[in-house]
Image (tube, rainbow, N blue to C red):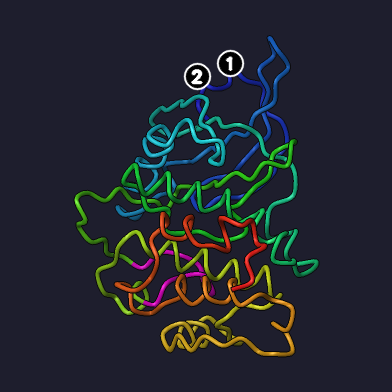
Amino acid sequence: MSEGLKRVYNVCEEIGQGRFGTVFRCFFPATGESFALKSIDKRLLTDSVDRECVEKESKIMQLLRGNPNIVEIVDVYEDEAYLDIVMELCDSSDLYDRISKRTFSDVEAATIMLPLMEAIAHCHRRGVAHRDIKPDNILFDSRNRLKLADFGSAEIFHDGLPMRGIVGTPYYVAPEVLSGRDYSEKVDIWSAGVILYIILAGIPPFYGDSAAEIFEAVLRGNLRFPTRIFYSVSPAAKDLLRKMLSKDVSKRFSAEQVLGHPWITSRGEATR
């Protein structure tokens, strides 16, 4: 990590791994306040696309400042070898930990989806597509507030211009990304829809025994609601899932439309 950072912060134990760097706990000695530090060794980035993503990450996080459901950037230090990003610390469990243990009722699921969609809508209003929405990147702070994190794959889009490039994670990646077509920020809506399905059902909507099989299932996009699993899930939740997981991007909801859906506005209490 950079010498500039080490002169200001005391670095402690490793607490995670991002796509491009290692995450440590650090603290500011004058106050004792703890933060998360993402330290990226630029010398390990041999791919020009990866280098571009790393350079964008801190700029994008600064662009998104001020939303309570997005991890806040605190400081940036950079030298020839390292890029160090200091962020607010979210040391509670992430969403992956929570949903791997149980399924959630409509009301419980809505308490997660509302702040997540508000974070995604904020990104899209600022012209940012996250492109890697998944439970591992959804954190919680000490007050149990949801925080969208890890903008290492994010991209800035302008005036409706499409994006390209295969990024994302099996299970959560949108079909138009896998097909190699141009795509829009609505890839984030697909990923959030997959998360909602898993929260309610305990299983992903499109699955397989390997990445290739998962991708084939995503490309088919055959959305089903098995009765034995969805017996207690409201029709309103299933309606929202259909609109978030539409293969037809023109029919897929935007973030603002998701926020306006009755299931969201009723906090999961709408039944139809």
Residue 50: image location, x then y, percent: 37, 52
Q: Is label 2 in a helix, a strand or a loop?
A: helix
| Foreground pick, 81 / 133 | 133
| Foreground pick, 108 / 268 | 268
Looking at numbered disc 2 in the image, what kind of residue is underneath it? Gly
Residue 198: which quarter of the image?
bottom right
Residue in the picture at 43% in, 49% down: 121
The mark found on residue 4 in the picture is 2
Residue 257: which quarter of the image?
bottom left
Q: Is label 1 in a helix, a strand or a loop?
A: helix
Looking at numbered disc 1 in the image, what kind of residue is underneath it? Val
**As drawn, is 104 to the left or to the right of 261?**
right
Task: Say whether marks 1 and 2 touch (CB < 8 Å).
Answer: yes
Was residue 169 drawn as part of the magenta stretch in this picture? yes
Was residue 114 drawn as part of the magenta stretch in this picture? no
Residue 47: image location, x then y, percent: 34, 55
Query: Label 1 belongs to which residue?
Result: 8
In the rendered image of this protein, does residue 5 appear above or below residue 82? above
Bounds of the magenta span?
166-175
